[in-house]
């Protein structure tokens, strides 16, 4: 699910990025409209582009990049912490119990389930004076 979501977000960023770059070129060149030249945008279009469209595109692009990376980073941290805790309690529990804990970690669907698994691992470590 996550790789597909990341690919969709990259496609969305690319779709937003191309018009954004073109708009930025116009903005930074400071093109002023010439009444006799139909190729130049009107003053109203330049104003709307500078103060509404470009900032909105920048915010959307930042959100499209920041949110998925944050979610992905949190899942990596949870995975690392879980496996570190498993290695800490491994000498104190049976392989069947480790298998059950690992299985429940793989099947979890919510933060609450993760917190229960983590609490169980901390309880095992604490009862064996490893915390």
Image: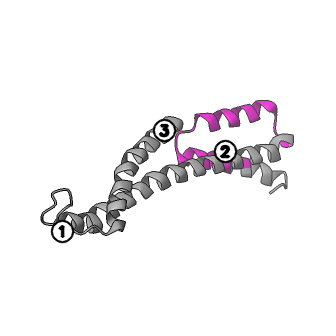
Which comes before the other along the chain, label 3 or label 1? 3
* Pair 3/2: label in front: 3
Q: Quadrant of residue 45?
A: bottom left
Residue highlighted by disc 3: 7
Q: Residue furthest right?
A: 91
Which comes before the other along the chain, label 3 or label 2? 3
Residue highlighted by disc 1: 43
* Viewer-side residue, 23 vs 71: 23
Q: With respect to residue 59, does 94 lie above or below? A: above
* Residue 9 position within the rendered picture, expressed as x and y whole percent measured from the top left: 44, 44
Q: Which residues are magenta?
A: 92-121
**Residues at circles 3 and 1 in contact by the CB criterion of under 8 Å:** no
Seen at 80% across and 31% down, the residue is 95
* Residue 4 position within the rendered picture, expressed as x and y whole percent measured from the top left: 49, 35
Q: Quadrant of residue 117?
A: top right
Query: In the shown orientation, is residue 106 left or right of residue 21?
Result: right
Q: How far apart, in angstroms, are the residues tagged by discs 3 and 1?
A: 38 Å
Count the numbered circles shown: 3
Q: How far apart, in angstroms, are the residues tagged by discs 1 and 2?
A: 53 Å
Q: Is-magenta flag for residue 93?
A: yes
Q: Residue furthest front?
A: 36
At label 3, counting other C-alpha atoms closer than 10 Å, the crowd grade (few under 14, some 14-19, many 20 or more) is: few
Q: Quadrant of residue 15?
A: top left
Seen at 49% across and 55% down, the residue is 66
Task: Label 3: state its secondary structure.
Answer: helix
Query: In the shown orientation, is residue 106 left or right of residue 9?
Result: right
Residue highlighted by disc 2: 79
């Amino acid at each position: 699910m996550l790789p597909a979501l990341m690919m969709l977000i990259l496609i969305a960023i690319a779709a937003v990025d191309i018009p954004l770059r073109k708009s930025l070129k116009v903005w930074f060149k400071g093109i002023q409209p010439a009444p006799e030249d139909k190729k130049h945008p009107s003053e109203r279009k330049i104003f709307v582009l500078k103060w509404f469209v470009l900032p909105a595109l920048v915010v959307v692009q930042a959100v499209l990049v920041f949110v998925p990376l944050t979610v992905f980073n949190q899942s990596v941290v949870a995975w690392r912490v879980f496996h570190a805790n498993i290695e800490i309690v491994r000498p104190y529990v049976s392989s069947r119990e480790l298998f059950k804990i690992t299985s429940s970690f793989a099947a979890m669907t919510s933060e609450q389930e993760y917190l229960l698994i983590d609490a169980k691992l901390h309880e095992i470590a604490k009862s064996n004076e490893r915390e």
